[in-house]
Amino acid sequence: MAGTERLGVALVGLGGAVATTAVAGMELLKRGLTDTKGLPLAGMHGLGLIDYGDLVFGGWDLYDDDLAKAARNHSVLSDTQLAAVSPILGKMKPWPASSNTDFCKNVVGSSTKRAKGLRDQVNGIRDDLEHFKKEQRLNRVVVINVASTERPVNLSLPQFATPEAFEAALDANDPNISPAMLYAYAAVSKGIPFANFTPSVAADVPALLELARRNGSPVAGKDGKTGQTLLKTVLAPALRDRALYVDGWYSTNILGNRDGEALNDPASKASKIDTKGAVLDSILGYKVQDHIVQIQYYRPRGDNKEAWDNIDVIGFCGQPMQLKINFLCKDSILAAPLVVELARTLDLAKRRGESGVIEELGCFFKAPMTRHGGTPEHSVPEQQRRLMGWLGKEGTQATGGTERVRG
């Protein structure tokens, strides 16, 4: 049921497959046309999480299609589902986005902010958030980045070291400042919660982490853990605990949506492979010599991603064995519910007075951020335990699936 408060969820990449699926899914839920399967925290009551019916969506995109048209183009939901929510989605259009093709070459749209420099772009982002909050009569706002993957950035540059250095670089239109950083800065400098669901560098800039701590902005990231890496971080702890030595792990996947198109650029792909490939050694406690991760853009597949894993393990008496996994999934159907839950949990953190990195939300990410640069936890069972403890439900499990929410 909807409550008395309204939370604005401002999505960077509102016209993308993940964002349109999240918006459409919440509209279907409000109308009783779907249930809460796939929403990990749907069964958590009495913890202060805002109701699904109280989420209000807006955001930015490089393409100005209304969300009904965008959702049809992405072909994630059924025709019946789209028909049910198109009257609402058809009224929603993204705000012009910040863009820099130096950071993401393969996704180029025409709906961009007209600004003289980086500072003006930040001011434009802030203005959008203020207008969103006022127009929709929102109590609070969170910002979540679900845009296309940007190329890597060197975080050791001096302009990223402190808030003061970053401010100076911003005013100097430093070419090393990416669009993802602009959104993160616009949020955390105003105390607004921010999550980075992409592999791009955003709030993990040291200067922005310090700003988040100073200004009371909870942050989380990065790169949503949805399919292949989710299974990897479930299986690896079991293999470790049974003393089955992982001799090699070959992972490859194909996808054809806009994210796949962005990753067809080698620089953007490098960011993604970095977050996907870092988990095994941390969980197992040793370096897997032959850990191979591949991502291929295959246009006909659309949002229907397919992943293959071949795992070579050595057991008792030195005997070799193999596991083979073939996972066919809709990427956005896995990702969209996590975006929704991140909005709810970051809002809870804000109301609790927490700021900086919320490590307990690491279960949602391939490359979880840590508060003091420590080694992140990747094992799903341990991540889940920490999340439940943070929520105040130690030792329990969410039981979503049949719950319905009305707006």
Image (cartoon, rainbow, N blue to C red):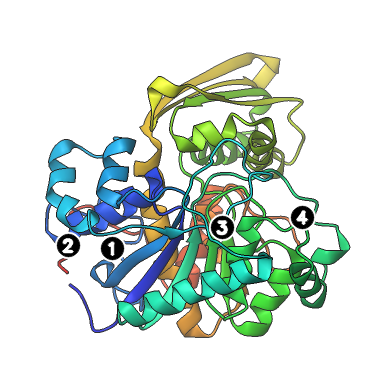
Which quadrant would the C terminus be assigned to in this image?
Answer: bottom left
Near mark 2 (Cα within 10 A), the count class, few <14, some 14-19 or many ≥20, is many
Mark 2 highlights which residue?
A: 30
Q: Is residue 186 visible?
A: yes
Residue 52 lies left or right of residue 325; in this view the side is left
Q: Position of residue 13 (x, y in %)?
A: 46, 52
Determine the secondary structure under disc 2: helix
Q: Earlier in the sequence, mark 1 or mark 4?
A: 1
- Spatial separation of the CA atoms under disc 1 and disc 4: 43 Å
Task: Tell me the mark number nearer the camera, choosing from 1 and 2.
Answer: 2
Would you identify the image quadrant in which residue 373 lies?
Answer: bottom right
Near mark 1 (Cα within 10 A), the count class, few <14, some 14-19 or many ≥20, is some
Mark 1 highlights which residue?
A: 43
Q: Earlier in the sequence, mark 2 or mark 3?
A: 2
Determine the secondary structure under disc 1: loop
Kind of residue indicated by mark 4: Asn
Which quadrant would the N terminus be assigned to in this image?
Answer: bottom left
Determine the secondary structure under disc 4: loop
Mark 4 highlights which residue?
A: 176
